[in-house]
Image: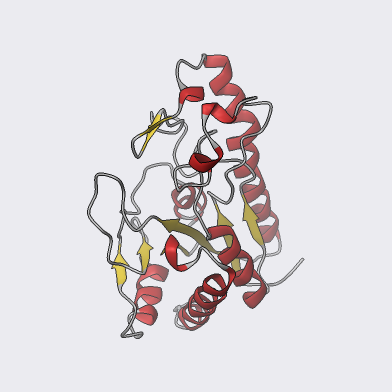
Amino acid sequence: NCNSKFLLLCDHATNRIPESISKNQLGLTKAQLDQHIAFDIGAKGTAIELSKNLTAPLITSNFSRLVIDPNRSPEDPTSVMQIYDGTIIRGNLDLSKAQLTYRRKNYYDAYHGEISNFINNKRKERLAPCLVSIHSFTPRLQLGATRPWHIGVLWDKDRRFSDLVINELTKHKEICVGKNKPYTGNLKGDTLSKHGTSNNLLHVLIEIRNDLISELVGQKKWAKIIELALKKSIKNIKE
């Protein structure tokens, strides 16, 4: 029960495929599950370090994005991926409506329920947490160009907080900061629109290139950089 100004989120924290979903890991090998297609490599470790640095609560998913993607609207046809960066996800082909509903209820809804409950409890205490979502991206997709950014800051409509974070990060001359890169933050029904925009809470999504945070030493380094940027940014918010 802490009075942090922040609530940290990690949507793609793990590559776990629960037994109740698939007895054979959706037909994927261990090597495939260890790739970015199944989770955001290094994101959970970085989020944990950041949570320690800020003494801030952290809510993470406990299932792979291949079960159902918590950062997409369930109405999005890619919320249960059938092919991802050139890999066919056999265990996601030809799913029945009942199977999809099961995944949504037990995984997607359960995760977002936790976040909603936390926010609602804070609001009862007259507190409005700033949401910080930690993700990682691969240096390049199979059919894509190499991505030069070290870190990306994403936003949709509400730029109150993301602009300040970008401003802090760009003070590091050696860091290449992507603004709404490598993706844009305007994914309808994503985690931050669901909990941030709809509640008028400050929020930001931070993407770190996964080769920089695949080991603990990198996770600690980037957690420190992000911690300082968040602390300075929150001080600059005009109430």
Q: Nearer the viewer, residue 37 or 77?
A: 37
151 vs 146, left or right, is: right
Tell me the residue at 63%/76% (across/down). Answer: 54
Tell me the residue at 66%/65% (across/down). Answer: 126
Which residue, as the protein is rendered here, is positioned at the far left?
A: 145
Tell me the residue at 22%/54% (across/down). Answer: 145
| Total marks placed | 0
Residue 236 location, quadrant: bottom left
> Which quarter of the image is occupied by the N terminus?
bottom right
121 vs 142, left or right, is: right
Q: x and y percent of residue 73 in the render?
A: 45, 37
Residue 174 location, quadrant: bottom left
Q: Nearer the viewer, residue 149 or 69?
A: 149
Q: x and y percent of residue 96 in the render?
A: 52, 14
When the figure is inspected, residue 232 is found, relative to residue 86, above or below; the finding is below
Tell me the residue at 29%/66% (across/down). Answer: 179
Q: x and y percent of residue 8 in the render?
A: 58, 62
Q: x and y percent of residue 197 in the render?
A: 44, 54
When the figure is inspected, residue 178 is found, relative to residue 168, above or below; the finding is above
Which residue, as the protein is rendered here, is positioned at the far right?
A: 1
Asked if one can make out residue 129 in the rendered structure from this viewpoint, the answer is no
Q: Nearer the viewer, residue 186 or 197?
A: 186
Q: How is the image coloured?
A: secondary structure
Asked if one can make out residue 158 in the rendered structure from this viewpoint, the answer is yes
Q: Nearer the viewer, residue 64 or 191?
A: 64
